[in-house]
Amino acid sequence: MNMLPVREVVVTPVAFPDPPLLNSAGVHQPWALRAVIQVRTADGTTGLGETYGDAPHLSLLNRAAGALDGLDAFDLAGLRARIADAIGTVDAPDRHGLTGGSTADKTLSKVVSPFEVALLDIQGKAIGRPVHDLLGGKVRDRVPFSAYLFYKWAGHPGAEPDAWGEALDPAGIVAQARAMIDRYGFSSIKLKGGVFPPEEEIAAIRALRDAFPELPLRLDPNAAWTPSTSIKVAEQTDGLLEYLEDPTGGLAGMAEVAALAPMPLATNMCVVAFADLPEAIMRDSVQIVLADHHYWGGLRASAELAAMCRVWGLGVSMHSNSHLGISLAAMTHLAAATPNLTYAVDTHTPWQSGVDVLVEPLAITEGAAIVPDGPGLGVTLDEDALARLHENWLHTDIRERDDTAYRQRFEPDYVKRRPRW
Amino acid sequence: MNMLPVREVVVTPVAFPDPPLLNSAGVHQPWALRAVIQVRTADGTTGLGETYGDAPHLSLLNRAAGALDGLDAFDLAGLRARIADAIGTVDAPDRHGLTGGSTADKTLSKVVSPFEVALLDIQGKAIGRPVHDLLGGKVRDRVPFSAYLFYKWAGHPGAEPDAWGEALDPAGIVAQARAMIDRYGFSSIKLKGGVFPPEEEIAAIRALRDAFPELPLRLDPNAAWTPSTSIKVAEQTDGLLEYLEDPTGGLAGMAEVAALAPMPLATNMCVVAFADLPEAIMRDSVQIVLADHHYWGGLRASAELAAMCRVWGLGVSMHSNSHLGISLAAMTHLAAATPNLTYAVDTHTPWQSGVDVLVEPLAITEGAAIVPDGPGLGVTLDEDALARLHENWLHTDIRERDDTAYRQRFEPDYVKRRPRW
């Protein structure tokens, strides 16, 4: 095969409708921002990537995009080196802080990620192989995802209620779970917590347990609790939870909780980059790492993370932010090729309002996505849909995700506090 | 691309002349044993691998070979699974113990390795890409190797002296270094120790320092010393050594030495499988891991090891046993794609007597091998040479490497003792 030099890189910011989902930082804005990456090589092969669409990140993506001309699609080491040169040492943290702390290295990994996915897509298309073959081969044909429940308002203030309706108490959460499971067949359930006082969220977990006696349950308050509150909640949910996710912030606090909690702790907030692993392991802060290729540096880096988890006896699953179908496909390939991914993967797919940038997004049926075996990611961009979602972006004035400011618009006294309880 | 199902696997035991190199287990026998693996897929593509040729290993290789029919060349996860099924839980330790302890998992990794290399060779050939492209892309065009000095007899007892001649004292070692560097241009030097009392080996290191004031030096006694002897040697070689390799055995002993040694410790004996890493890191037993794809499970597993070393701040280089050109090519591709491989790699190439199974083995000039950019490993099997080396194997009665028994033939009182001093 000849070289596959990159000739064109297009970064398209998009926005798609997002329901008012509540979390410990505030509430989701009416539009979720993403960026779609298209990389084209000289032979006309196009690779796709997807990542965050916040303005500071977008600016780095564009800087990176300008540095890739002539890069061979197999040269992933060169990809990171070129992007590092292009963006320099810069730290672009998220305003919401829902994916933990930020460093220059994590920022670099975030910028590299969608381009790495796009290059793997190109590699796969060029050789006629699915991306999972480039990650060592699939070990499963179906990737299980979990139902991702949120407390939510009926609709965005001033707008009609959305199809999911309100969920502000245990009954609302159970109804949401029922609707989501009816539609997608999920066989495990995650509740995003950190919204109401812990007793109320424990009550919701109990209600879910009653309604779905067989399904594994998880609770994720996004570090809304102190260590001592976390320990109390852990004791009160003994036997109810498959794992407790990020009850409190930081490796020290998590270690304090982990030492007493009867269930394993999972995280996507205190172990968010390779540099966090040594201390996390030394302290035994977490038992399960929720990988996220969007900030770990791509699919190969996430596979390396999984290998480390295997060696140090940590469980592995996968974190999700609001996303479209390119990310879902990338996550599915990665999960398919990760032998020790032993928990159902998180996804925001049900909250996506059926909008996508793909001709035929992966479907989740019976709680799982069928692993695509076509070349590359196995998905096709819908140019018209991309244009429509880019129009959305042009017409919204949201340029950075800020769940806190949006909530404050309706509740002026609201403050983001972590821990809150 | 269509599937690339494996249709034929040939395991050929070979033997090639080996000089009487001394080490802490005894002395090299007149023939070094290797096994050459040829894997052919349905389309006629052949991939090459190379590994140990000892009888117990050979028997496992043959069992593995029989289990690969129909396996797709990209299915590396399936490769390991099939071989695990085929050989079951079995532990085949080396008699010499020069690569540390053994477990069923390490045995499995040793059996998988040459097949993985052969499948990567096939993948590369099928897509027209070098193996380093399958490992993330090369980060260097030349891979530096180190001069690997041995105390040695002039020749095997009863035979003529070989071209390298005797080296049993500092002057002999310096002369050997001079000859080897004149020929290959190495710019770092490793002395295999553990043969003479430590004072004599320290004297050899001092002589090397005087003769080659600029070149980094390493000393590897293969765990011949107690921790306290190791500490004394470390103090006496302060400022002389780039690293001290496996002065003593075991993670506890190494940690004791590491705490006081002024230079970093390297190992290929106490960290020999992923399962060793957590304790080694917890104890700070070693500062540099010498990877060896032959027992770590192949090139991708070794790349994972290198990623772990990067995260935990360990240095990485590469260990060598007597080998032929297929292994040299595999090591070169791996080293080319390993960003944090920051030390010159060990190789026994100079001791190979010019014999090989390749049409044109990689040359080491100016101390480095040029990274091959042709498809796959970029090397071609010489069928006639393979047949000749297989004839050697048929005609020798050596079926397992046993440096100790061979030395005892000439020195009946010799016993292998680790530690000896």
Image (tube, coloured by chain):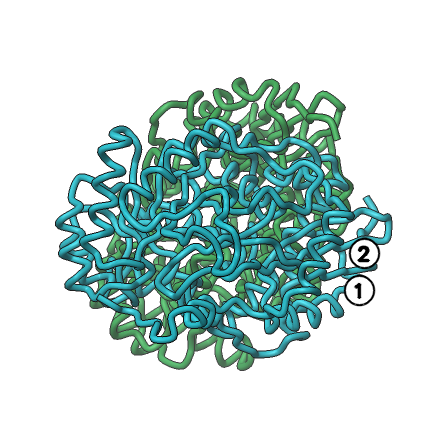
Chain colours: A cyan, B green
Residue B363 visible at all: no
How many residues crowd mark 2 within 10 Å: few (<14), some (14–19), many (20+)?
A: some
> In the rendered image of this protein, does residue B420 appear above or below residue B406?
below
Depth check: give the residue in front, B57 or A281: A281
**Which residue shows up at 58% across the image and 61% down it?**
A52
**Which residue shows up at 69% across the image and 24% down it?**
B41
Residue A132 spot, x, y in % from top left: 59, 38
Mark identifier at residue A5: 2
Residue A274 visible at all: yes
Q: Quadrant of the C terminus of chain A?
A: bottom left
Q: Earlier in the sequence, mark 2 or mark 1?
A: 2
Q: Residue furthest right?
A: A43
CA–CA distance in space, label 2 to label 1? 7 Å
Q: Quadrant of the N terminus of chain A?
A: top right
Label 1: which secondary element: loop
**Which residue shows up at 67% across the image and 31% down it?**
B386
**Left or right: residue A141 compared with residue A397:** left
Label 2: which secondary element: loop
Residue B61 spot, x, y in % from top left: 50, 26
Residue A185 spot, x, y in % from top left: 44, 29
Residue type at the position of mark 2: Pro
Q: In the rendered structure, the residue with mark 2 lies on which chain?
A: A
The residue to which callout 1 is attached is A69
**Left or right: residue B51 compared with residue B337:** left
Residue B188 spot, x, y in % from top left: 55, 69
The answer to which image quadrant residue A240 occupies is top left
Depth check: give the residue in front, A108 or A134: A108
Depth check: give the residue in front, A336 or B393: A336
Asked if labels 1 and 2 touch by Cβ distance under 8 angstroms, the answer is yes
Depth check: give the residue in front, A294 or A354: A354
Residue type at the position of mark 1: Asp
The answer to which image quadrant residue A407 occupies is bottom left
